[in-house]
Amino acid sequence: MTYYYITGTSSGIGLALTQQVLNLANTFVIGYARRKHIDHERYRHIYVDFSLTGAAREVDIPLYPDAQQVVLINNAGMLGDVKPIGEIDNELLEKTFMVNTVSPAILTNRFISIYQPVAELITVINISSGAARHAVESWGAYCASKAAIDMYSLVLHAEQNFLENPKVKVISLAPGVVDTPMQDLIRQVNPRYFPQAERFHQYKQKDLLTPAEKVAKKIVELVGNPPNDPIVDLRML
């Protein structure tokens, strides 16, 4: 049995991922989100808000002793306050790093600690962004928080390279421009604060957004065939 632990299962990539995984045989999904939109005999929902301090430390990560492979997908993300540095709301700045960096880092640390003595293979997929690798005006919190999770993934990958029998695989994945609720938020931003606003309106108008279902399918494929390089741009595959 393969157990998937997926954060942000209420919408977007997380919801599409959960639906695709449940279509596979011998899978079980533990979903984490503030809202529940899935009812399935092989789905367990855990209500949590990862923007809250301590949430990732305290949330339940149930252990399944029969797990042969376990997969943690840190998908939950937050765009944050789209304003220049110096004008960002500090509470939103803190929450953005909590959702995009602190919570995934803690969950990964706990997950590996729990399953390393039990599972044959542990896969961690961190949903990153092209914005982690390219500066975007007024996205200071988002760019920096995603860049941090890229580096966290690189460190985990380097640590596994020292082991004779590494059982942990890690991928930090930039999915491209995906048709999710986050894109709706981007299009609502005042162009005065966001010089690239028009480009994101064009993505929608010209039907250039990738469906979440297509991204989810590729992620599931990567679980079965992880690349050697942990930093992945899905558009290049």
Image (tube, rainbow, N blue to C red):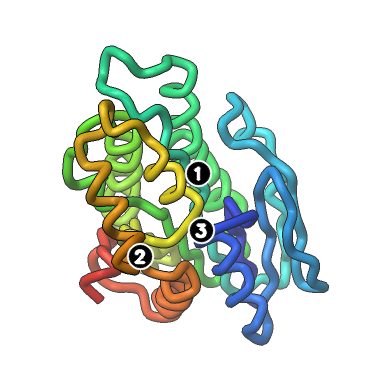
Secondary structure beneath dot 2 equals: loop
Q: In the shown orientation, is residue 91 left or right of residue 119?
A: left
Check residue 73 in the rendering and tell me which mark sits there, or answer none: 3
Observer-nearest of 56 and 197: 197
Q: Is residue 161 visible?
A: no
- Percent from the top left, x then y, of residue 195? 20, 35
Q: Which residue in the rendered view is the most extreme toward the left? A: 134
Three-letter amino acid code at the position of disc 3: Ile
The residue drawn where x is 38% and y is 43% is 186
Secondary structure beneath dot 1 equals: helix
Mark toward the viewer: 3 or 2: 2
Three-letter amino acid code at the position of disc 1: Asn
Q: CA distance from mark 1 to mark 2?
A: 33 Å
Is tag 3's residue or tag 1's residue first in the polypeptide sequence? Answer: 3
The residue drawn where x is 50% and y is 51% is 181
Q: In the shown orientation, is residue 20 left or right of residue 141?
A: right
Check residue 209 in the rendering and tell me which mark sits there, or answer none: 2
Q: CA distance from mark 3 to mark 1?
A: 13 Å
Image quarter where the N terminus lies is bottom right
Question: Are dots 3 and 1 in contact, CB under 8 Å?
Answer: no
Q: Which residue is mark 1?
A: 109
Q: In the shown orientation, is residue 53 left or right of residue 100?
A: right
* In the image, residue 226 above or below residue 187: below
Q: Which residue in the rendered view is the most extreme toward the front? A: 205
Mark toward the viewer: 3 or 1: 3
